[in-house]
Image: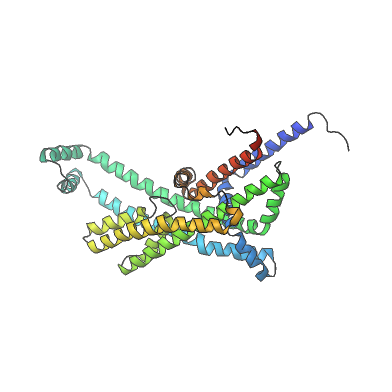
């Protein structure tokens, strides 16, 4: 076996870095979809393994069935909700534009005067405010029109890009199911870390993906179904409201309140006080307290314990501060899908710290 030529190792490392950077640059438009598919595939991989014997051990058939099941059970309902929201916003935009086109300075002042009479403001202040509204009515109307256009474009743009994102995710999901084991083995071979640390990182990612996905989907189903039933009983569009509650429940702390608070306000404006009270109580007590603050921690703890050794170190999944901050950070950076990405990225960073601590425990100063 010949000796390595001078600088061969350094040159190879440079080529490796260039290859990694070039690959990331090339596939940058698809990284979010691939990461999302990897999370879903990892979280549901046990289902694929259980399904495999029933498909005559055909990896292709089992991967196809699992991908179709994930699409129908998880992805399609969310896509339906976004399309439905786009249609509702389009209708609302048309009505708002018609109303705004019929307004002038006088009608706008009368509208605001009717609002001001219900506020604890003295008459002189009301007159001053109305004069300011008359003087700047055109700017106000222009700002409202720009805002409605911006919101419409945001929802429609998000929906169209989301549909493309979903198509790519389902496509990648099939290959992660079919070839996931081989991909993981190849990564362990290429990694310069010892296999025990490679396995530690992979186990932590697999466990976290399972806990995060199942707990989020489980809570979403609980909140969505419960609100859909209550909405139907009150004569409201239960399917749409239930879907909206289910999707917004992914967001910690505020979550479903983004949907049920506007419903309560609308019911109060319409004089339907029974609907307003029932929705408010259900949102605060059942959705906000029982499901979100009682059922969610119980579900996460049960899922973590069911993983045994693989579930060790997953306290981050139930740490309120880290969960909230990482979720909102993911939302800011990646949009709706960042609700999954944020907590996973934060937890994997903590896993890397754990690996470093474990590998260098002999040299760390613990005094």
For the C terminus, the image quarter is top right
Q: Which of 5 and 354 is in front in this view?
A: 354
Quick check: 241 left or right of 190?
left
Question: Residue, x 40% and y 57% (percent of image)?
Answer: 85
User: Where residue 39 sits in the image (x, y, percent)?
Assistant: 57, 53
User: Which residue is outermost to the left?
Assistant: 123
Question: Residue, x 58% and y 60% (percent of image)?
Answer: 44
User: Where residue 196 sits in the image (x, y, percent)?
Assistant: 69, 47
Q: Which of 73 and 102 is in front in this view?
A: 73
For the N terminus, the image quarter is top right
User: Where residue 287 sits in the image (x, y, percent)?
Assistant: 37, 58
User: Which residue is outermost to the right?
Assistant: 1
User: Which residue is outermost to the top?
Assistant: 6
Write down the quadrant of residue 284 in the picture: bottom left
Q: Nearer the viewer, residue 119 or 143?
A: 119
User: Which residue is outermost to the front?
Assistant: 367
Question: Residue, x 45% and y 62% (percent of image)?
Answer: 221
Quick check: 153 left or right of 317?
left
Q: Which of 207 and 29 is in front in this view?
A: 207
Q: Is residue 130 visible?
A: yes
Q: Can residue 86 be seen in this view?
A: no
Question: Residue, x 71% and y 49% (percent of image)?
Answer: 186
Q: How is the image coloured?
A: rainbow
Write down the quadrant of residue 304 in the picture: bottom right
Quick check: 158 left or right of 64?
left
């Amino acid at each position: 076996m010949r000796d390595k030529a001078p600088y061969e190792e350094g040159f190879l490392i440079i080529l490796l870095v260039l290859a990694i950077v070039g690959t990331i640059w090339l596939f940058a438009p698809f990284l979010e979809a691939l990461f999302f598919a990897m999370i879903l595939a990892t979280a549901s991989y046990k289902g694929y393994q259980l399904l495999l014997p029933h498909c005559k051990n055909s990896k292709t058939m089992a991967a196809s069935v699992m991908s179709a099941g994930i699409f129908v059970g998880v992805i399609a309902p969310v896509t339906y909700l976004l399309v439905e929201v786009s249609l509702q916003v389009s209708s609302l935009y048309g009505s708002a534009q018609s109303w705004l086109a019929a307004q002038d300075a006088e009608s706008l002042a009368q509208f605001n005067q009717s609002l001001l009479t219900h506020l604890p403001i003295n008459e002189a202040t009301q007159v001053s405010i109305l004069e300011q509204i008359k003087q700047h009515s055109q700017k106000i109307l222009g700002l409202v029109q720009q805002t409605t256009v911006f919101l419409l474009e945001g929802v429609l743009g998000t929906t169209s890009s989301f549909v493309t994102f979903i198509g790519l995710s389902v496509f990648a999901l099939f290959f992660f199911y079919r070839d996931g084991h081989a991909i993981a083995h190849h990564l362990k071979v290429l990694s310069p870390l010892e296999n025990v640390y490679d396995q530690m990182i992979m186990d932590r990612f697999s466990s976290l993906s399972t806990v995060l996905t199942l707990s989020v989907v489980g809570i979403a189903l609980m909140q969505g179904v419960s609100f859909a039933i209550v909405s139907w009983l009150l004569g409201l569009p239960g399917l749409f409201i239930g879907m909206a509650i289910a999707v917004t429940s992914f967001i910690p702390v505020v979550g479903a309140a983004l949907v049920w608070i506007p419903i309560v306000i609308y019911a109060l404006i319409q004089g339907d006080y029974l609907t307003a009270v029932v929705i408010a109580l259900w949102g605060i007590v059942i959705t906000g307290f029982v499901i979100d603050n009682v059922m969610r921690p119980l579900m996460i703890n049960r899922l973590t314990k069911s993983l045994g050794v693989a579930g060790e170190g997953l306290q981050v999944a139930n740490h309120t501060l880290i969960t909230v901050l990482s979720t909102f950070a993911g939302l800011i950076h990646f949009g709706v899908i960042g609700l999954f990405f944020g907590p996973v990225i934060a937890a994997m960073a903590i896993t890397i710290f754990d690996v470093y601590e474990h590998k260098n425990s002999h040299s760390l100063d613990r005094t």
